[in-house]
Amino acid sequence: MTSQTPFLVLDHVSKVYRRNQSLIERIRKMEEGGTKAVSDVSLVISEGETVGLVGESGCGKSTLARLVSGLMAPTQGDIVFRKDPAGKTPRLQMIFQDPYSSLNGRWTIEDIIAEPIKVHRLRRGRAAIRARVEELLVQVGLSPTDAEKYPQEFSGGQRQRISIARALAGEPQFLILDEPTSALDVSVQAQILNLLRDLQKNLGLTSLFITHNLSVVRIMADRIGVMYLGELVEEASAEQLFRKPKHPYTRLLIDAAPNMDTSDRSLHPIAGELPNPAFPPAGCRFHTRCPFAQDVCRTAAPPRKATPEGGMFRCHFDLDLSKEVKTPPLAKVKTA
Amino acid sequence: MTSVVNTPSAVRPRRSRLSKLFHAVCYAPGATVCAIVILLMFVYAFVTPLFSQNPFEFAGMSVLDSFIPPMWMEEGMSDFPLGTDDQGRNLLTAMAYGMRTSIVVGILSVVIGLVLGGGLGLIAGFVGGKVDAFIMRVADVQLAYPALLLAMIIDGAARAALGAERNVTTAITIVVLSIGIAFWVQYARTIRSSVMIERDQDYVSAARITGRSNLSIIALHILPNVMAPVLVIATINLGIAIITEATLSFLGIGIPVTTPSLGTLIRNGNNFLQSGEWWISVWPCLVLVLFVVSVNILGDHLRDVYNPRLRGRS
Amino acid sequence: MTTPLLDVRDLTVTINRDGRPITALDKVSFSVNPGEVLGVVGESGAGKSITGAAIIDLLVPPLKRTGGTISLNGDRLDQLSPKEMRRVRGGKIGFIFQDPMTSLNPVITIGRQLCDAIETHLRLGGNETKRRALDWIARVGLPNPDVQFKRYPHQLSGGMRQRIVIALALCANPSLVIADEPTTALDVSVQAHILQLMRDLHRESEVSMMLITHDLGVIAKMADRVAVLYAGRVAEISPVAELFANPSHPYTRGLIRATPMPTADGGVQLDQIPGAMPGLGAVPPGCAFNPRCSRAQSDCRSVVPPLVTQESSAFSCFHPLERDVA
């Protein structure tokens, strides 16, 4: 695994959202404050791999997606894609959460899907482009006749399929998925996830999958990063993360989501409230809610520790959190 | 409960253009009447001059026929259905010429306001930051002056700069420019706020990731999505522009008296209002009111149709 | 056999679109027993929220109740005048909305809002009302009630706001609380808190609850019985353990299997249901689920299956799934 050239390297990436300074602050030349949405995140993605990012709102996962996509520039750190032999950076595409705002309502489906093809000149001539659009529509489970329609004529799930077709039309080497199924109903979400899994398998895409849903990321990702208040607190292979989490937050997050087991109806809330991301606690950011917190956690930021299995976590202690694990390891995924 | 409204409806049968028009008429009978009134007035203003002598040219005047009242009054003549003015001009045809000038001035000044305000609003909304702040502060300063006063200032300044020697075309150009510049702020503000909303939509992000340039994103993605509310304002502003033109002309600083416009006609008639020849000013006033009211009702209706809150997702 | 607290029979709601009535809820029947938590589950457009709104007469036009009976403790709610209904709303029936931001008045302090709710329905007098309000702020788990009393909704986090909404729903000692997606807008860790709070308060006060949600995990942890809605009709009503272990309606099983959840044998399931739920006015003849159902036969395509009761469950399906012998 490690012998492969990394496809994408995030090197100590931070992003600060500056807030507008008041006149007095500007006159006094006070230091610019702001919310550190992403704080010192390092991550490596290999070719053909899907890396998942999970976390609650305000953890910086969507900001990280926008940084990787190039929509925003990081305040500190570097985001480096591997260049191909010709020296070009790989083509990116992104699939968004909101199936309503991600399609231009005044364009036909054909125009929407054809846009990346035309921009990148992947096909020449009207007929060739039209044929490619129809091929893509079929590939995502829609009908070729849908090409003439407008986005308003489709449901949320169908619009998400159109978004996927548009992303595939750009023949991307790297795909960013920002909560692609969060706005969808359960049965439609399953359809979209299955479609994305098939595409992953058949096209060998490298991708970054962002979600707040641990079960979804477990299905979709090879490796998973857990984010809390802008920091990447743990990163491990999907199986490892669920079987032997090393960071208390990961453990608690896994337990907090209610599962469908009706024999054990206990709930597992995480103590306390999510702190304001603009003012993260000193020391370990999770110490205000952590059941294992000691004095050292309140003062010193935990170091980045590597695991023998190739993951990493940020915690002062090397806790054994697998004992509380009630969910067995990921064996196989059933698909229809 | 919104989920109910947003549920995609069953396949809606595609309607033909004719039946679409029919549905629109049934849906809004008031706006339809106004549209017909506006259409008739356009026909009146642009077709009448093709068949009649311009009453403001020497051949169109006849002092012998001056002050003839409308035809249904005692001294009325069927040759002049609405009567004549002090120079013996046929008011029915004079008003057609006047309407023509007013409409042309109105439309041209709206176009100038639209292009100027739209362009500045687009830049302000898309670029943001200091550029946005500068443009919008200028707009704020301009808003502190009544539009009419501003048009008078611009008009006066232009006249001073060009000197007294000027022909009718220059005068009309000055009026068009001053009205257009006086009204750009409204377009700029509307476009700017719409652009700021659209700029952050995911479809714009998608286009950017795909590699579109800013210019093509503006032209292909953002402009089509922000034009609807602006066109509605433009419709309503057409009425205001025509009133402004009439006001300027009435005050004697707009279109010269020698050229017919609704404003000059009213101004001329005003001189005889006290002496009993009411028809000279009342007819152009009525035409002006009818036209502006129709334009406003139609504009209101268009605003309802394009209301972003009503522009549902289903 | 206990007499139900809330009994809904053949509730029908239509929506008027271009002068044509379209059925949004089609003869929905269910009941809530005293002290019970009834989970109402379904995908968006299934009619879960409409059901909740119809019970307390809060349907937004063009939605309109056109048939059926609703009784609370034997009193017919559907025959009350708007004035009498206002007394029931917030009094006998509390309501918890999905979005805590919009269900609280942003310009009134939370203390004032609580006092108003208590005073309107209980008429206790100034001091006692304030004491109760402070008591409720403490009961829903907010620190320093005296300080919170004077705060405005925007000064609280989403989770704290939802706690206040819960206090508002419960402060008039209602006999039934309708909670419409109470945790959907919240993060996972906050959601568990709110569910825990609702469970604690439910145990203390013995209030009956109608929990409307799309999240089967929430249902599994909170509900005693579950009603599954599909396209404005009841697909199945079963005790919660029964529903997850032995669903009768093919849609129920499809919904359970489509929810990505770690399963007992260690996998993560992900079975999809083909197609999508029919939109309003596009419900096919016969069983609404028939185009997506692998068990559909000719009778499913022509006749609407009635809700039949079998032991503790009820389902509307001609070809129900066989019970596994557990």
Image (cartoon, coloured by chain):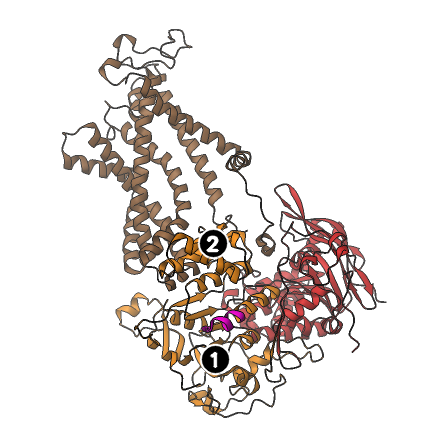
Q: Residue at x 34, y 10 (%)?
A: B68
The crowd level at tag 1 (other Cα within 10 Å; few <14, some 14-19, many 20+) is many
CA separation, marks 1 and 2? 35 Å
SS category of the residue bearing label 1: strand
Q: Which chain is red?
A: C
Nearer to us in this view, C250 or A265: C250
Boundaries of the magenta span: A198-208
Q: Check residue A207 for magenta coloring.
A: yes
- Which residue is labeled 2 in the image? A109
Whether residue A73 is situated above or below residue A161 in the rendered picture: below
Chain B pictured colour: brown
- The colour of chain A is orange
Measuring from the top left, give residue C35's x and y in whole percent: 76, 69
Q: Quadrant of the C terminus of chain A?
A: bottom right
Q: Splitting the image into 4 quarters, where does residue C170 fall? A: bottom right
> Of all residues shown, which one is farthest toward the right?
C1
- Kind of residue sitting beneath label 2: Ile
**Rendering coords of residue B112 (x, y %):** 29, 41
Task: Identify the subunit bearing mark 2.
Answer: A
Are both tags, 1 and 2, on one chain? yes
The residue where tag 1 is placed is A225
Kindly identify the amino acid type of the residue bearing the numbered disc 1.
Answer: Gly
Residue B144 seen in this snapshot: no
Q: Is residue A316 magenta?
A: no
Q: Nearer the viewer, residue C58 or A197?
A: A197
- Quadrant of the rendered structure where residue C234 is? bottom right
Secondary element under disc 2, as helix, strand or loop, is helix
- Horizontal side, residue B256 vs residue A120: left or right: left
Q: Earlier in the sequence, mark 1 or mark 2?
A: 2
Give left or right: position of A140 versus C66. Answer: left
Residue B145 visible within the image? yes
Above or below residue C256? Residue A241 is: below
